[in-house]
Amino acid sequence: MADRPSPSESPDPSPAQDPQSEIPGLGEQFGRTRNALVGLISAHVNLAKAEFGEIAGQLKRAAAFAGIALLLLFLAGMLVVVGTALFFGEVFFHSVGWGVLLGSELFIGGAALLVLAIIDLGWARAFSSFVVALGIGLAVTGVFAVDWAAVSRNNSGLPGGFVLAVLTGVVVFGLLGAVLGASFGRGAAAAGLVAGVVFGALLGALASAHLGLRVSVALGLAALLLFWPICAAVLVFRHGFDFDKLKDRFMPDQTIATTKETIEWVREQMPLGRKS
């Protein structure tokens, strides 16, 4: 009882805090709001970066797969084209080499015809050149298909097979060269005759060996594919190459002229233009 503090000695209670002192000020509230907004925006930005990074990785992966797929399709197409050429060479001519030769001539000749079409090769000229090349191919096939030695043996009045084949080649291709050259003038006709004679003599010498019908057809087809783009090029360039005509095909002349007229009209409508 003696140790118990008296009421007079009890500690005073702590003074009551003012509720207004716990409310933050306007600047502090603005700072907190700004920090929260910046944090929210930063979180969204980081999320967007992460998502876009993942999307970019997926796009790279898809692009790589698409590139590999296109490469495989290209290789498959090349395999089909090359394999088809080799297949036909083996089936029709019993040699893959003929497939390689004829396929190469077909692709190179096709590319040359497309380039000539860009310059000035129309359907009429392409068909005319094909007819001429077809005639040369048939002539080559005919010369090689004949067994000149047998013809010489069966006809005692004729010369030997070699001489007969050479003479036939000279006559056939000499006349063919002269006829083709005549469409370009007398000088071209003479040059065509000489070229045809030389070409016919060489073919006749080869044809005297009688390589057989299958090889004859293959040689004729090779001649057709060889001379088709050559004849087309001759038809395109026989009158010279007109650069102005080619430029007119790829220049918007009407648009340029109309634009110039519009500019002149605008100048006339302007005060300075009317004073001048």
Image (cartoon, rainbow, N blue to C red):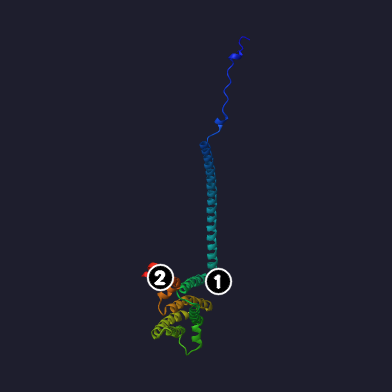
Residue that numbered label 2 is attached to: 268
Q: Amino acid at mark 2?
A: Glu
Quarter where residue 198 is shown: bottom left
- Along the line of sight, which residue is nearer the eye, 5 or 152? 5
Seen as rendered, the residue at the extreme right is 1
- Along the line of sight, which residue is nearer the eye, 224 or 125? 125
Seen as rendered, the residue at the extreme bottom is 157
Give percent across and percent down for residue 252.
Answer: 45, 71
- Along the line of sight, which residue is nearer the eye, 17 or 79? 17
Q: Please give the name of the residue rendered at 55% of the width and 48% of the height, measured from the top-left corner.
A: 51
Q: Please give the name of the residue rendered at 55% of the width and 59% of the height, measured from the top-left corner.
A: 69
Per the image, label 1 sits on a secondary structure element best described as helix
Q: Characterize the local packing of mark 2: few (<14), some (14-19) or many (20 or more) Cα atoms within 10 angstroms.
A: some
57 lies left or right of 234:
right
Q: Characterize the local packing of mark 1: few (<14), some (14-19) or many (20 or more) Cα atoms within 10 angstroms.
A: some
Q: Amino acid at mark 1?
A: Phe
Is the C-beta separation of discs 2 and 1 under 8 Å?
Answer: no
- Choose the circle earlier in sequence order: 2 or 1: 1
Residue that numbered label 1 is attached to: 88
- Along the line of sight, which residue is nearer the eye, 140 or 107? 107
State how far apart marks 2 and 1 are (Cα).
Answer: 71 Å
| Quadrant assignment for the C terminus | bottom left
Per the image, label 2 sits on a secondary structure element best described as helix
Give percent across and percent down for residue 35.
Answer: 52, 39
| Quadrant assignment for the N terminus | top right
